[in-house]
């Protein structure tokens, strides 16, 4: 595997379900990101992990919970989501500051 | 706060036409980076170029060229002799210092380019 991979590619869940999105980067980068892309808004940054430490983003609801067990893996745990959370969730990674971010293919999430 | 404006939301051209995608940005930083990404229908954002604020030289890569002008806060992207495979959504982005010494990208709303045969 090369680059940034994300699983699953598509996910349909009910509002009471708990699910997790997985991201893995094979680029040796030291920062990882979660973005949300919906039809109504441009790409929005949700979370940043730099050197495996989470940078707080207070604007994201607590029903989204990130986890970064090591520099290559990033998870987004989802629980009690709302239909408006349906979107494309993109993971990205980068090396050092101000370098380009490389994106995964995204997980298309639908909340019923 | 930083802001990126892509005034065009959608453009449709015929193959072999040249097309320019506009990007205007706002920032108070003296050091910053600008980016262009391509998002084909598959969904994955593909990195195209990074430009730092001290390098105003225009860049050409094959059929792609970029015109960075600090005086007008613009970073425009031109595709020469467009092809059907260029059909995608194109995003301009600006780096912004974030919390904890990290940075984030501020994206424009994107511009959907359709190249018809």
Image (tube, rainbow, N blue to C red):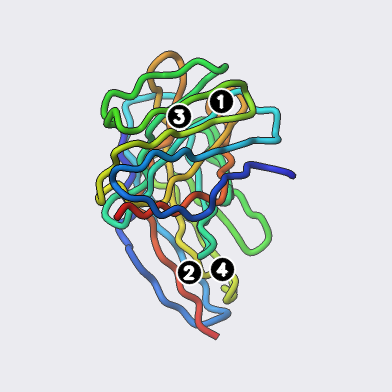
> Mark 3 or mark 4, which is nearer the start of the sequence?
3
Numbered disc 2: secondary structure: strand
Q: Which mark is residue A31?
A: 1
What chain does badge 3 belong to? Answer: B
In the rendered image, residue B102, in percent from the top left (x then y), is placed at: 46, 20
Q: Please name whichever residue, B41 or B35, is drawn nearer the observer in this view of the structure.
A: B41
Whole-angstrom CA distance, mark 3 to mark 2, is 26 Å
Q: Residues within 10 Å of mark 3 (few under 14, many from 20)?
A: some
Q: Which mark is residue B32?
A: 3
Numbered disc 1: secondary structure: strand
Residue B25 is left or right of residue A53, and the answer is left
Whole-angstrom CA distance, mark 4 to mark 1, is 29 Å
In the rendered image, residue B32, in percent from the top left (x then y), is placed at: 45, 29
Whole-angstrom CA distance, mark 4 to mark 3, is 27 Å
Whole-angstrom CA distance, mark 1 to mark 2, is 34 Å
Q: Residue at x 64, y 28 (%)?
A: A72
One can see residue B1 in this view: no
Q: Is residue A47 above or below residue B16?
A: above
Whole-angstrom CA distance, mark 2 to mark 4, is 11 Å
Q: Residue at x 40, y 23 (%)?
A: B97
Is mark 4 in CB contact (under 8 Å) with mark 3? no
Which quadrant is home to the C terminus of chain A? Answer: bottom left
Provide the residue designation for mark 4. B86
Q: Residues within 10 Å of mark 2 (few under 14, many from 20)?
A: some
> Mark 2 or mark 3, which is nearer the start of the sequence?
2
Provide the residue designation for mark 2. B19
Numbered disc 4: secondary structure: helix
């Amino acid at each position: 595997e090369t680059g940034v991979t994300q699983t699953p590619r598509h996910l349909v869940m009910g509002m009471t379900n708990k699910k997790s999105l997985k991201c893995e980067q094979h680029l040796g980068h030291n920062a990882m990101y979660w973005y949300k892309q919906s039809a109504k808004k441009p790409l929005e940054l949700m979370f940043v992990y730099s050197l495996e430490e989470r940078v707080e983003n207070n604007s994201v609801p607590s029903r989204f919970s990130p986890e970064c067990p090591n520099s290559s893996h990033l998870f987004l745990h989802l629980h009690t989501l709302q239909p408006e959370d349906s979107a494309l969730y993109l993971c990205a990674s980068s090396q050092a500051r101000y370098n380009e971010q490389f994106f995964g293919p995204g997980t298309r999430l639908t909340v019923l | 706060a930083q802001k990126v404006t892509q005034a065009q939301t959608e453009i449709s051209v015929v193959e072999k036409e040249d097309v320019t995608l506009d990007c205007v940005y706002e920032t108070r930083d003296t050091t910053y980076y600008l980016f262009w990404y391509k998002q084909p229908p598959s969904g994955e954002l593909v990195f195209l170029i990074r430009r730092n604020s001290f390098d105003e030289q225009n860049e050409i890569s094959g059929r792609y060229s970029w015109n960075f002008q600090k005086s007008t806060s613009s970073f425009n992207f031109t595709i020469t002799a467009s092809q059907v495979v260029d059909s995608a959504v194109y995003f301009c982005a600006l780096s912004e210092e974030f919390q904890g010494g990290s940075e984030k990208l501020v994206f424009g709303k994107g511009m959907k380019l359709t190249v018809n045969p």
